[in-house]
Image (spheres, helix red, strand yellow):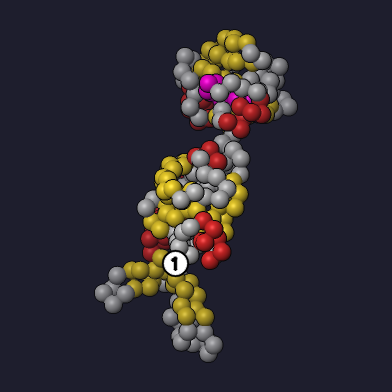
Amino acid sequence: MNPGNSGGALIDAYGRLVGINTAILSQSGGSIGIGFAIPSTFARSIAIALVRDGEVRRGLLGVNLEDLNLEYAEAFKVPEGAGVIIQSVFEGLPAALGGLRKGDVVVAINGLAVKNVSELRLQIAARPPGDSVRVSIRRAGEALDLDIVLADPNNPYGTGFLSGELLDGLEVALVDDVLRKRFGLEREIEGLVVVGVADNSRFADTFPLGAVLLEINGVSPESVDHARALLESRTTSRVYILNQGRVRYFAIRP
C-alpha cells in the first residue's frame, strides 16, 4: 500500500475484493508498514444505503459498554475477552425496552461473537434504524437471547410531528413503559401519546400533553408514520383519544 492508494481496491491473491484502502502506518513513508482498509462487506452496506436512501443511517442500541478484562471476567464467570459488559442502560431506548440490564455480558450479535466494544459498535453501526438484532448475553451465569429493534440516533425516542392540515403541530410517540410512567398511563394502554405541541397548533387545547391517540379512522396507529398515513387517507378523520381517564371521539376537519 502506497501514499495515494486511499479509496482504492484491496484484493487478495485470487483477485477478490476484500477491502477499500484507507491509510498506512509507515516509518519510512513508503509501502513498508501496517496498512488499514475498510472491510468490503462494510463498504458494500454503505454503498447500498447511499444508493437507496441518499445517506447512511446507523442504528442505536442505547448502552454504555466496557471491555471484559480479567477482573470482570472472574466476577461474571465468563472467559476474558469473550464479550463486553454493559455498564449502564439508557431508559426509554432500545436496549432497556428490549430487556438488557446493567451488568449483562454481551457475547454475540446475530450469532456473531463480539470480543470487545469496537466489534459490537461496528456490528450495530452496520445496521439501520428499525432493524431487529438478536443480542446474546450472559446474566448471572444464564445464557439469554433478546431481540431488540434499533432506534434512530437522530430521533432515539421515535417521536415525530403530525404535519399537514389534520392534527398539524402535534408531536407524538409510541406509548412505552417510560411514557406510561411519565404520564401516569395504565399498562394496557396502547397508541400514540402527545409529548409536544407546537405553539401555533390549533389543537393545543384539544390534545394536551399526555393525551393518547387510541384510534384513527377505526385503526390503532402502530407508529408515527402509520398515523400520518391514516390521517392522509381521508379529508375528515375520526380520532379516538384518551385524556385524563376519559375517552372521547373527535371529528377532525381541515
Crowding at dot 1, Cα within 10 Å, few <14 / some 14-19 / many 20+, comes out as some
Residue 180 placed where, x, y %? 61, 27
For the point 66% across and 25% down, which residue is it? 183
Where does the image place residue 67, in percent across and percent down from the top left?
Answer: 54, 62
Image position of 150 with respect to 177: above or below? below
* Residue in view at x 71 percent, y 16 percent: 205
- Look at the image and give the residue range highlighted in magenta: 188-195
Residue 219, percent from left and from top: 46, 18
Instruction: Give the residue furthest to the right.
Output: 199
Q: Is residue 149 above or below residue 213?
A: below
Above or below: residue 213 compared with residue 113:
above
Taking the magenta stretch, the answer to whether it contains residue 152 is no
Q: In which quarter of the image is the C terminus?
A: top right
> Which residue was labeled with disc 1?
38
Name the residue: 56% across, 30% down: 176
Relative placement, left or right, of 78 versus 90 is: left
Quadrant of the frame with the N terminus: bottom left
- The amino acid at mark 1 is Ile
The image shows residue 246 at horizontal and vertical percentages of 63, 11
Asked which quadrant contains residue 214, the reply is: top right
Q: Which of 170 and 145 is in front in this view?
A: 145
